[in-house]
Image (tube, coloured by chain):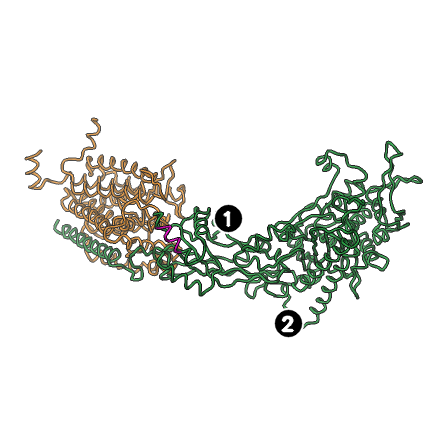
Chain colours: A green, B orange
Amino acid sequence: MSTTGGRLRALQIVFAAAFLLVAAQSVRMQVIGADATLGGNGERLRVLPIEPSRGQILDRNGVVMAWNSPRFSLAIVPGDLPEQPEARRRDLLRVEAESGVAYSTIDAALQGPLARIDPLSPVAVRDSVEREEAVRLRAALADIPAVRVVARPIREYGGGDALPHVLGYVGPLTADDAEAYVDRGYALDARVGRAGVEATYEEALRGRPGSRLAVADPSGRVLDVRSEDPAEAGADLVLALDLDLQQAAQAALERGVRSGLATVRAEAGREPPIATGAVVVMDARSGKLRALATTPSFDAQVFSGVPGEELGDLIADPARPLVHRGFQEVRSPGSIFKPLVGAAALEDGIATAGTRITSTGALIVRNRYDPSVVYRFGDWAAHGTLDFAGGIARSSDVYFYYLAGGYDEDDGPPFEGLGAERLAWWAETFGLGRPTGVDLPGEASGLVPTPGWKREQTGDEWLLGDTYTFGIGQGYLTTTPLEMAVATAAIANGGTLWTPQVAEALRQGEQVTPVAPIVAGRVPVSAEHLATVRAAMRAAADPEGTAITGEPPGITIGGKTGTAEWGRPYADGEFDTHGWYAGFAPYDDPEIVVIVYLQHGVGSTHAGPVAREVLAAYFEQEVQRTRSPAGTRAPVGNAAGAGAAADDTAAAEATP
Amino acid sequence: MRYLALLAPPGRSDRWLWAAVAGLVLLGLAMVHSASLGPEPHPRLSAAAARQLVYAVVGVVGMLALARQDYRALRGPAPLVFAAGAAVLALVLVFGTAEFGARRWFALGPISIQPSEFAKLVLTITVAAYAAGRRATAVPLGAAFAMLAVLAVLVMLEPDLGTTLVLVAGWIGVLVAWGISWRVLGTLAGSGVALGPLAFALAVSDYQRERLAVFFDPGHDPLGSGYNLQQAEVALHAGGLTGRGLFGGAESHLAGVAARSSDFIFALVGEELGLLGALTVLALVGIVAWRGLETARTAPDGFGRLLAAGLTVTIVSQALLNAAVSIRLFPATGIPMPFVSQGGSALVTMLLAVGLLQSIAAHRPASARERWTGERWG
């Protein structure tokens, strides 16, 4: 018993020692402070997010189009403001006096929906503050704990008016999407891509945010950083677009719009209030867009930093310069639709290369029930008898009335056309009537009409005349220039429908990841028939053809003009016309497709010369590109350069 | 009402022990409620606290009922108790539900039972029953070690390192009271130290290694495992002498620490009730230690002495280990604070252990002073 009693005594001693140790350590940690860096006054460890630096946007040759500039932001943490209204008002008035931001503006920002989501998240009241001003503000407002002056780089854009729609801009979260972004790890005061490639490639450009464990005082000022998980900078986005070519296209486009307008003024004596236009240049072998011009445009600098009054002016402008006419607006394509009709007619056996049709300047159709009533479908000239190549080269409307709707000859067997349903099927097969899926937000999609659609929309029956106007790319049919580029490229490249892309590659340091071309589909037209259509477009660009105006010196091309009547007829029965041009070059081994659209103009007279300038600029650059020693220009991830065969492989893998 | 009399504490039970345990249980309920609070508005009784209250009632009823029984009745069926305990531990490895990467629980509808908690009682009872009346020579020592090994290995397989450590502590408590020679104890300790690295290499899982690495350098993984330790440190410091007040809810520095209501509850006490609160907890546990060992010393027989010593060491070592984790004296192993931490199986087990202690206390021979007060008031 005495032994065990001693043992229990030993246990008591062990316990007593352990209790003393635990109690002493508790005292040390709670009162003396185990860690000298963690002082009193509510200092605490916080996990603070680190925003990654956003990737730059470069053109195909490495010219920087969007970059970050160091700036500061004056922000207020609503939750750190005094609760008492008088004290709060006094603080905000001080901020107003020092920063020049109106009290009402500050107050509105602090009452905004974002501030309500998390009152402890800073709300920016003034962005884009220069360094000296930031230092002054920080000193002047140091005694208001709710005020933060923090480094916040601003996004700046270059290239003048060449690329603002493509680049887009970044903006703050909105009440509607804030929660979704916060769930994805964004800070409440983050900036995200709101338009253009800034929006499409947001994830890659943003990078991976990091975090740091830091000792902070109650107002969030970091006193000491314990450890850091660094942010991973966003990738640079290399565009397929070529700034030089883009600027050349922009200049040519503006000249074309002016010449079209001058003609309308001089010959018709009319003064259209607005004149718009677009140019699309796409690589026929990959769908990569080399230029995407629109007019009227605006200076990308408007989107830099904090968009201000200029942006309001742009929104209010009746010419709607914020809308890219290349892919955000639909119009009748007119005769540049004819090569598609031609390919369809050849493939469906409606016509052959030798099919001959006579145009006397108009097609007369008698009313089915009352032959005394006749309808007249005009041609733009009496072309006489034409074969398939001639029909396209001369752009004979009567030729395509036949192919589209057929005709009951007075003498001889009736000519059977494609018919409206078949025509619509072919138009959709060429990618019309739906968005192309280009890597830019806000794409418009044209309309491919069908008899069913017309009945539904208007309650009226589809007439033969509807098929005729459809066949020459007018009437209800609408497309974007970009849709026509994709369809024309399919004719040029042997039937591949590409999903157009403005992005060429993503670049993370030295590592370049090409953005793989995407095949959207194939056009079921035989190689032979496509070659027949290309030959006809080649003939159109011969001296006797309408499309000769688009051919640059020294290059043979295939081309097609379009002049689409639109709007309401004037008193003299004349219409306004869009001028179109669709071309591919070089004829023998097509690399490039160009689409020109002018709101006011004639295809051959006004759109053709724009296409010629753009093609000339393209080939001049290609010559330079191949001649210049490696390194002086930096073509990045040039998938197209690898040749069409390689493209097909890469694209096949990328196709879902 | 007649049946309630069955729950009345027996005449010669230990009042200090009753009071200390009552204080710890009530404090535990308050802390569990506080730990489960989110941002305002706060419910009057959080769901977690309500559940804990139910377990407390179950445990207290069990404790009072056990205190009225004669603990000596356990001695006979001890082998049966051991066999059943080992079987259940084996079953949980097969049929148990896995949470946090460990297979430790039986899910029975809304409640889950953690058999390894009850294993603490099983081991103490069995070893005490076996050792009582035997001399602590080589063969009985080996048998006692085998009992520990069976249960400890089964618990280790779940894996549950914290409970294993408590099992070993309770077993050593019985052995010390048994009267084994210091030489044997020294050999055991020595082989423990020697086998440590081997056990570490063979049986310690990756997350335990991680915790160990973090213990020595909390900055090692500040956003992961190290976060708990860093936050515990900050919370204790913020608590200071008198604490930041109960029911801070989401304001707590431990708000991001998942185990704040169990493994880190000592840090929560320190934050909300300050050093005074933390020392109060230690003092109450100290009373349990004092009265528990006193019960062992005055136990009417060898079984009672060994059992009381084992139970007391089990409770107290567990409390000390839990506190040590929060104040960075010991790596995080997942040991709850007896009576205080959230968890039904642990609470009921600890209360039953106290019931056994009280049963032993009630059967000890009366001291002179007790005889005197007994004659006067009884």
Q: Amino acid at mark 1?
A: Thr
The residue pinned by badge 2 equals A632
Q: Quadrant of residue A256?
A: bottom right
Assess disc 1: are there few (<14), some (14-19) or many (≥20) residues with their C-alpha within 10 Å of its C-alpha.
some
Q: Magenta span has A132?
A: no
What kind of residue is marked 2? Thr
- On the image, the x and y values in percent for residue A115 come to 44, 48
Q: Position of residue A344 (x, y in %)?
A: 79, 47
Q: Is residue A636 above or below residue A352?
A: below
Residue most toward the right? A411
Q: What range of the chain is rendered magenta?
A: A87-94
- Give percent across and percent down for residue A655: 65, 52
- Give the mark toward the camera: 1 or 2: 1
Is B329 left or right of A255, judged from the image as shown?
left
Residue picked out by circle 1 = A174
- Secondary structure found at label 2: loop
Image height of B312 relative to A510, above or below:
above
Between discs 1 and 2, the one toward the N terminus:
1
**Of residues A470 and A28, which is closer to you in this image?**
A470
Residue found at the far front of this picture: A269
Q: Nearer the viewer, residue A118 or A61?
A: A118
Q: Are marks 1 and 2 in contact (CB under 8 Å)?
A: no
In three-dimensional space, the C-alpha distance between marks 1 and 2, rounded to whole angstroms, equals 43 Å
Does residue A416 appear left or right of residue B159 in this picture? right
Q: Is residue A353 visible?
A: yes
The dominant secondary structure in magenta is helix
Q: Secondary structure at mark 1?
A: loop
Q: Nearer the viewer, residue A362 or A274?
A: A274
- Name the outermost residue toward the top: B2
